[in-house]
Image (cartoon, rainbow, N blue to C red):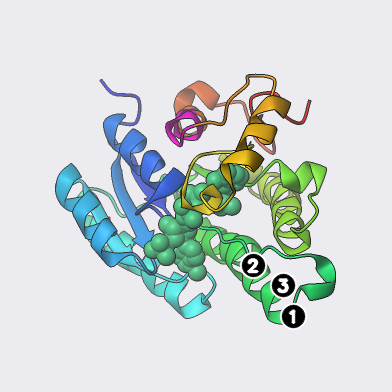
């Protein structure tokens, strides 16, 4: 039997990048996967069509409370014929609005915090109730190494990702008595649209500072998420697992 057979997973921002790799991996491991898209309907529909009936795409904006409430309601109603529950939540959706602090506007700050940090709060809160009545659940937040190290030009983004580490620990402590395990994965530099903007020269310099000598592919984050989502990680909670090729060591 596959490791996640019979499990119901919800992944935010699953149409592309790391989220897409997570959707593919959880599906391959046997889970039924619901994933959200916000501005990428074509990619989302193509992915759902490729993977078949056990993978469904739903439009949602994680920064909007109403949208999150209706998303979770839809998933619970839709999964009613198997079991009215959500076993795994992956808070992956995230954005950057990078600039030096003197040029950073209030809206650059607000939009990044709202999507990356408030979004994870709203989503985690919304799945708490079903997970508490199930007396089981896994919540996995996608943080970032810059939430630990900080980074020039990313005051908003690194604050949102540092906040996710605190949110992870606090949710984990609050929900542990109901057997809900909450962890964070902190990637280093992964090849996706988010990092496509940097020049080849910058990329070479970055690669030379990574002990493994290369950037990573999205599936290398998805495999850690799949591990945390599985029973193999039944005694791990409140942790942040760094997946950065040794960059921040
Ligand atoms: P991408 O830019 O490739 O994808 C971002 C995803 O987030 C998209 O699926 C997008 O959906 C979704 N999204 C953005 N805003 C919202 C919103 N308001 N509501 C719902 N979904 C939203 O990024 P990555 O795949 O690179 O990043 C995924 C996660 O990994 C992020 O949290 C990021 O911070 C983190 N990360 C990435 C690293 C990297 O090097 N790439 C390093 C460390 C962390 P849509 O396209 O439908 O709008």
Residue 45 falls in image quadrant: bottom left
Q: What stretch is highlighted in magenta?
A: 217-223
Instruction: Please state which of residues 226 and 115 is positioned toward the viewer in this rendering.
Output: 115
Q: Which residue is drawn at 58% across and 59% down?
A: 120
Q: For residue 194: magenta?
A: no
Q: Which residue bears the numbered disc 1?
A: 106
Image vertical order of residue 213 relative to residue 105, above or below: above
Cα separation between marks 3 and 1: 5 Å
Q: From this viewpoint, which residue is outermost toward the right?
A: 102
| Quarter placement of the N terminus | top left
Q: Which residue bears the numbered disc 2?
A: 112
Q: Which residue bears the numbered disc 3?
A: 109
| Quarter placement of the C terminus | top right
Residue 38 placement (x, y as % from top left): 39, 68
Is the residue marked by circle 1 packed among few (<14), some (14-19), or many (20+) residues within 10 Å? few
Marks 2 and 1, the one that precedes in the sequence: 1
Residue 6 placement (x, y as % from top left): 28, 36
Is the residue marked by circle 3 packed among few (<14), some (14-19), or many (20+) residues within 10 Å? many
Q: Which residue is drawn at 65% across and 35% down?
A: 237
Residue 97 placement (x, y as % from top left): 64, 66
Q: Can residue 88 be seen in this view?
A: no
User: Which structural element holds mark 3?
Assistant: helix
Q: Do the residues labelled 2 and 3 touch (CB within 8 Å)?
A: yes
Q: Seen in the image, is 2 located left or right of residue 222?
A: left
Q: Seen in the image, is 94 located left or right of residue 226?
A: right
Residue 183 falls in image quadrant: top right
User: Which structural element holds mark 1?
Assistant: helix
Residue 235 placement (x, y as % from top left): 61, 26
Image vertical order of residue 114 relative to residue 15, above or below: below
């Amino acid at each position: 039997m596959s490791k996640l057979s019979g499990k119901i997973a919800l992944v935010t921002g699953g149409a592309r990048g790391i989220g897409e790799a997570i959707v593919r991996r959880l599906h391959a491991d046997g889970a039924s996967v619901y994933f959200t898209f916000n501005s990428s309907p074509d990619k989302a529909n193509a992915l759902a069509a490729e993977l078949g009936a056990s993978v469904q795409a739903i439009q949602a904006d994680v920064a909007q409370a109403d949208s999150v409430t209706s998303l979770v309601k839809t998933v619970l109603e839709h999964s009613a014929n198997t079991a009215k529950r959500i076993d795994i939540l992956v808070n992956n959706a995230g954005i950057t609005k990078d600039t030096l602090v003197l040029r950073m506007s209030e809206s650059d700050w607000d939009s990044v915090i709202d999507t990356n940090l408030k979004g994870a709060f709203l989503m985690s809160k919304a799945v708490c109730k079903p997970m508490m009545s199930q007396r089981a659940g896994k919540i996995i937040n996608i943080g970032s190494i810059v939430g630990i190290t900080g980074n020039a030009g990313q005051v908003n983004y690194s604050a949102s990702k540092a906040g996710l580490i605190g949110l992870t620990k606090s949710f984990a402590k609050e929900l542990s008595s109901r057997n809900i395990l909450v962890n964070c994965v902190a990637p280093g530099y992964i090849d996706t649209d988010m990092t496509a903007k940097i020049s080849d020269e910058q990329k070479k310099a970055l690669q030379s500072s990574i002990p493994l000598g290369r950037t990573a592919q999205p599936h290398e984050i998805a495999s850690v998420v799949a591990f945390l989502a599985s029973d193999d990680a039944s005694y791990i909670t409140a942790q942040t697992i760094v997946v950065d090729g040794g960059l921040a060591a």
